[in-house]
Amino acid sequence: MKVRGFANEEKLRAYGFSEEDGIWTYHVRPLEGFELIIRAHGDELSGELFDTDLHEPYTLHLVEEATGEFVGRVREAYLREMEAVLRACFDGFGEPMTKALFEAARRKYGDEPEYLWEDHDGAVLRRKDTGKWYAVVLTVERYKLGLEGKEKVEIVDVRADPVALPDLVDGVKVFRGWHMNKKHWITLLLDGTLPIETLEEFLAESYLLAK
């Protein structure tokens, strides 16, 4: 199944996953008599449950109409393991540009996103030497940026030169900082409106300004 977010390889490895041909696999026994094989790749997470006594797959927990105490316990144990992996090993955003931006920060500066809020709807990138943030990734309803629609969109706040900032803001692709100091921060859409090359340029400028 597709999930909101992307698998973080370092987190998967630390959790106990092993990798082969780009697929990360983890084995766990959620209940006595059952083995769960969890696979992760990109924005995909799947779980295959086996009855170890019968040596065959068990699928009744996936049938919504299936009821009963035993099926309920199996379903609860299955979901508990899957949700634990999702919380521990997936970065909580779904846009490819968001993933690409995190990869750029990892490649250029060795920085990983820090999730400071429990709902995983916000993450920050900070310099190691100063401890200052140079990017804040959030989700926000489009209309709060002055755009049409109430759908949520992923955005990144980055620092900008206060002198140049007014000329950067166009209200279409670049906005004054959302929930940040509007004299020093701008907001960029991560829905593909801006190419990754442009996002990386803004990220590099913000990194320097956070020195």
Image: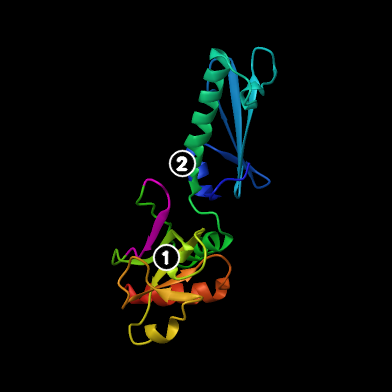
User: Magenta residues?
Assistant: 118-128
Q: Quadrant of the N terminus?
A: top right
Number of the label disc, if any, that sits on residue 87 = 2
Task: Residue 118: name its quadrant.
Answer: top left
Q: Which kind of residue does numbered mark 1 sit on?
A: Lys
Q: CA distance from mark 2 to mark 1?
A: 28 Å
Q: Position of residue 33 (x, y in %)?
A: 58, 15
Q: Residues within 10 Å of mark 1 (few under 14, many from 20)?
A: few
Q: Position of residue 62 (x, y in %)?
A: 63, 27
Is-magenta flag for residue 121? yes
* Residue 172 % position (x, y): 50, 76
In the image, 190 versus 152, the foreground residue is 152
Q: Which mark is residue 144?
A: 1
Q: Residues within 10 Å of mark 2 (few under 14, many from 20)?
A: few
Q: Earlier in the sequence, mark 2 or mark 1?
A: 2
Quick one: SS at disc 2?
A: helix
Q: How many marks?
A: 2
In the rendered image, the quadrant that contains the C terminus is bottom left
Q: Which numbered circle lies on residue 189?
A: none
Residue pictured at 40% horizontal, 55% vertical: 122
